[in-house]
Image (cartoon, helix red, strand yellow):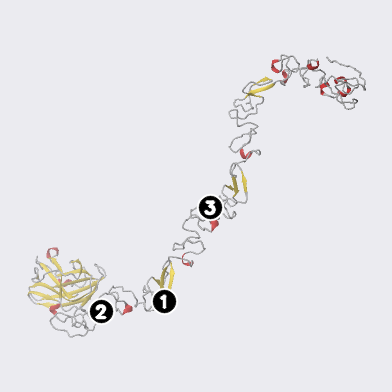
Amino acid sequence: MRILLFSLVLYGCSNPPESADCEDGVSCPEICDDAVDNDGNGSTDCDDVACGEDLLCDFDRDDDGFIGIEYGGDDCDDEEPTVYPGHVEICDGLDNDCNGLWDDDDPGLDLDSQLDWYRDDDGDGFGQSGPSQRFCEGPSGSASNDDDCDDDDPNRNPDAAEVCNNVDDDCDGLRDDDDPDVDLTGAPTFYLDNDGDTDGDPTQSITACERPNGYSPESTDCDDNDPEVTGRDVDGDGLTSCDGDCDDYNADVNPSAVEVCNNLDDDCNGLLDEDDPFLLDATTFYVDDDGDGDGDVSQPLDACQQPVGYSATFTDCDDSDPTVTGLDSDADGLTSCDGDCDDSDPILNLDDADGDGFTTCDGDCDGSDPQAYPYAYEIPGDCIDQDCDGLTGDFNCRDEFEMGSDDDSSWTTANYFRGAVFLATDQVDLLDVGWYLGLTGNCDLDYYVHEGPTANGPWTTVFAETVTHGAGTDFQLSPPINRTLYPGTYYGIGVAWNCSATYYGDYNGWAGTYPLGDYISTAWDNAYPGFDPNYVPAGQGAGTNLAYYAFFGYL
């Protein structure tokens, strides 16, 4: 109901109310709520046109056509234009129709103004998709939308910030680096790794949740175009390839290392072993022009390995003569540089121990006997080689060597010869051969010495001579043989006879066996050359005793 109030009170301008606060008593401003005609125009408060724009005099402040109840009207909220009697009740938290009820409590509610409310288990204001209920205000644990992508996590909803956690935080279907809205605060920085050595360029970086392909979390590469160069210290030696470490997988190789002989560039200067002037442990070798194993001290060379034509020793006094060296090979205290005539034989040297004026190099054959030296007088019968010619000149001075014996039982009755095969281990001058035989009559004895490279030949006859002996038991001595036997050579020594003979037992005076060499075999038979088959008369018997034979010569 709209009520219009008009009142008109006339006052004489010349006679204003006493309460008017005006100096001249005329044209004072109207005060709209003091019940006084302040301006003396006959109208007071809201009846005065001067108060027409004052809020105190606006009876329908929300212009909804209804006067507020404070002015006698029935608008229950004259500040809200959607609140007045007869207005449709809607969901807005107001008593729109001024019936004392609002929203869901008002049976006259326009149901189309209600909202769909969805279950919100995590209480983040965003509901899960599924069944809904319509209310103006949703019940506890509900939300007016179904936009939540994880209703068990209050940190995941459309209002959440996308962060690096491999989760779609803001429910836009994208996660982490795939979401352009991701918050990269605190995310790691990665650096372009152009050369693929897993170390990046510090000048080219990005911030991301996960390392992109072609990027590295490290940023120490000083040359990102060279995969062999990196700022990483792989071998832990304190230096990187950016620092010049040429092998960052070997802690012993770096610019601070010392060059040693190991076929590596230890100090990373591009040179190794002998080519590096800073090599520490080189060995000095010396030119050995004559190839005698001893070098020239005036021609040294530092190297890791001994070069061809060099020696580790440097005592050669004449490097053009391979027979002269400063090495004492025979350890006799003298070298060929000192005049040692045979540095392979410690007996031959320049020592004149017996003071006879001759050294062993001069041919002194006994350095302990001052009467034995080259061309000295040979004293007969003393069995001493005074003149150092290798002979004593005395038959009785010969050394006797018993090679062994043949057991007759191992021989056939047709064989009338004996002998032995042996390998000479020392150089010996064989003078003659003796046999103990009991001859039944005049008998021809053939003496043989054969020489060969193996125990089975082939054989070369180096001595053969026939001697006739009479009947009787005797020591049968061969003619002078005077043959030198050499170490490493095989010799077959034997005798054959053409008469019946008895082999004698151990001869009185043969005290022992003195080997001339390695005993090979006593089986000296027709397989060996030099024996005349005509010397084997058929049917001749043989005794059952042992036949002994001896070799005589000089050692």
What separation in Å lies between label 3 and label 1 (alpha carbons)? Answer: 49 Å
Q: Judging from the image, what secondary structure is the residue with disc 3 in?
A: loop
Which quadrant is home to the N terminus? Answer: top right
Q: Are marks 2 and 1 in contact (CB under 8 Å)?
A: no
Q: Judging from the image, what secondary structure is the residue with disc 1 in?
A: loop
Number of marks drawn: 3
Q: Is residue 538 visible?
A: yes
Q: Nearer the viewer's eye, disc 2 or disc 3?
A: 3
Residue 321, labelled with which disc? none
Residue corresponding to mark 1 = 298
In the image, taking residue 118 as reference, residue 547 lies left or right, namely left
Q: Earlier in the sequence, mark 2 or mark 3?
A: 3
Residue corresponding to mark 2 = 351
Which quadrant is home to the C terminus? Answer: bottom left
The answer to which quarter of the image holds residue 326 is bottom left
Q: Earlier in the sequence, mark 2 or mark 1?
A: 1
What separation in Å lies between label 2 and label 1 (alpha carbons)? Answer: 30 Å
- Between 304 and 248, the one lying in front of the other is 248
What separation in Å lies between label 2 and label 3 (alpha carbons)? Answer: 71 Å
Residue type, mark 1 in image: Ser
In the image, taking residue 377 as reference, residue 10 lies left or right, namely right
Q: Are marks 3 and 1 in contact (CB under 8 Å)?
A: no
- Between 407 and 88, the one lying in front of the other is 88
The answer to which quarter of the image holds residue 436 is bottom left
Residue type, mark 2 in image: Asp
In the image, taking residue 190 as reference, residue 11 lies left or right, namely right
In the image, taking residue 414 as reference, residue 81 lies left or right, namely right
Q: Earlier in the sequence, mark 3 or mark 1?
A: 3
Residue corresponding to mark 3 = 232
